[in-house]
Amino acid sequence: MQTHPVTASQSVSPQVAVVGGGIAGSAAALKLSELGVKVSLFEAGPSLVNGPPACHLHAGGNLYREISDEQCLKLLEQSIHTLRVFPHAVNQRPTVISVPLNDPGEPEALLPRLRKVQAHYAKLIEQDSANQKLGPANDYYRLYSREQLEQLAKQEIVSQPQSPDEWMIPVAKHLDLSAFKFPFVQVQEYGLSLLRIAASVKLASERLANCQVFTHSRVTHIELLPGTTPRWRVDYSHQKGSHSVEVDYLINACGYRSGSIDDMAKLSRSRMVEFKAAYLANWPSQQGRWPELIVHGERGTPNGMAQLTPYPDGLFQLHGMTDTVTLFKGGLVSSSQNSAQPELNPSLSRKLTQGWQSEEVEQRTAEAVKHMSRYLPSFSNAEVAGRPLFGAQQIPGSDPSLRAASVSFDKAHYARTEIVKFSSALSAAEQIIENIRELGLLSPAVCGDLNTLQSTQGLAYQQVLNLAEQLAEQRNYPLSLAR
């Protein structure tokens, strides 16, 4: 077994190991590397940022009626931060929020929060004009009455919408308006391309000489070494054999497998894991560009929320918050007294490690199409377009509605990122850097702009897109998902 000892002076340049190459681990690795820290990033899979589906930038948390206003404001800030750092990741189109007649909620109940989020967005722009990433604050949301939508339904669909009204035309034309309460809300929550973020992260890591990325590398053992200054030994196996590295600080960024690293470190932690999936469908009769469409509903019931996320070339991603679509019976599990790692049932674990049976893909995608076409009748002829986007999402603690979590610290020189939403990764990385400074491992003189990542700035869009398309191909997804 090879051991790589620390060579740099600790007060100037510590060595850090990051276990897990999802968005949380990658963001921490890039930020630390830019500060001169020597980083070893371990990822068991073949490429970075290959986690649960991320398609929506939660810039204000309007998909979640059940979370606190405070979480919504946090999600807004984190989303703006994400767009500043990953400028090529945005799919710029609004989201339409609707409440159907079969739902006990009222559209008016959404308005106080929307006003609060809009005011907070205006304040962020006032503090720094570079925060205007979602259009002008005054245009953050817009309401549409039934009469307005009926008028818009008479207009021709525009291939490249330029105004809020033009974005609403396909919705007004195709939705069964008699099934809804009014007003509808159009809000500037954009789409997010997981594949273009993965491409940006890979290209950025290649620019940083002190960021060593080990893919196909599984951490097999971690151990706190004896001595006055806490240090960790990390053993890992790779295609070329077993190795080990000694570091001054360890970051557990293993996502839904974080509990297995906590177990190795002999740390207890209360957490939940939820298995979820989204489905890909081609809609041959679709016309024009669509906004994202949300039909609110009570989670876990047959009327659970329906979500239609548009991509180019008639490709759509579908969520339905029911047990037959996105959610799974037994899909939410908790850690135990004996282990910090929640264990999913064998059939769900098998999906994570070996993939899906084709008949299951057909069946679940058909259920997703059926769920959406209750409100959008012409969508009923949509067809399976590829394997589902799926994964297990970690939720720290015991509140399954939590959406804006980020990081926790334990023992000596040990952090775990516990993000629930993609956009929380950067704020988690900043909290870890702050902790490393407080421990005296990073000189206060070593500072970077926490609001940005130098290594992702100046990447050419075409270069990011080309790599994102390659990743789509490698991961067996339609190329449209990268575009």
Image (spheres, rainbow, N blue to C red):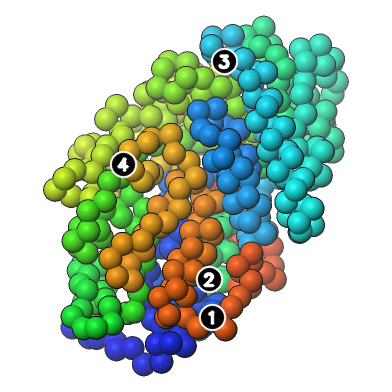
* Residue 275 image offset from top left, x and y in percent: 35, 38
Q: Observer-nearest residue: 59 or 450?
A: 450
Q: Which mark is residue 444?
A: 1
Query: Crowding at label 4, few (<14), some or many (≥20) Cα neighbours within 10 Å?
Result: many
Question: Would you name the residue on which mark 4 appears?
Answer: 272
Q: Give the SS element for disc 2.
A: helix
**Residue 3 seen in the current view:** yes
Q: Amino acid at mark 3?
A: Gly
Judged left or right of residue 397, residue 287 is: right
* Residue 459 image offset from top left, x and y in percent: 66, 69
Mark 1 vs 3: CB contact within 8 A: no
Q: Amino acid at mark 4?
A: Met
The residue under the point 29% across, 87% down is 4
- C-alpha span from label 4 to label 2: 28 Å
- C-alpha span from label 3 to label 4: 28 Å
Vertical side of 204 occupied by 400: above or below:
above
Q: Amino acid at mark 1?
A: Pro
Earlier-in-chain disc, 2 versus 3: 2
Earlier-in-chain disc, 4 versus 1: 4
Query: Crowding at label 2, few (<14), some or many (≥20) Cα neighbours within 10 Å?
Result: many
Judged left or right of residue 85, residue 222 is: left
Q: Which mark is residue 31?
A: 2
* Residue 475 image offset from top left, x and y in percent: 44, 53
Q: Observer-nearest residue: 278 or 471?
A: 278
Q: Which mark is residue 105?
A: 3
Earlier-in-chain disc, 4 versus 2: 2
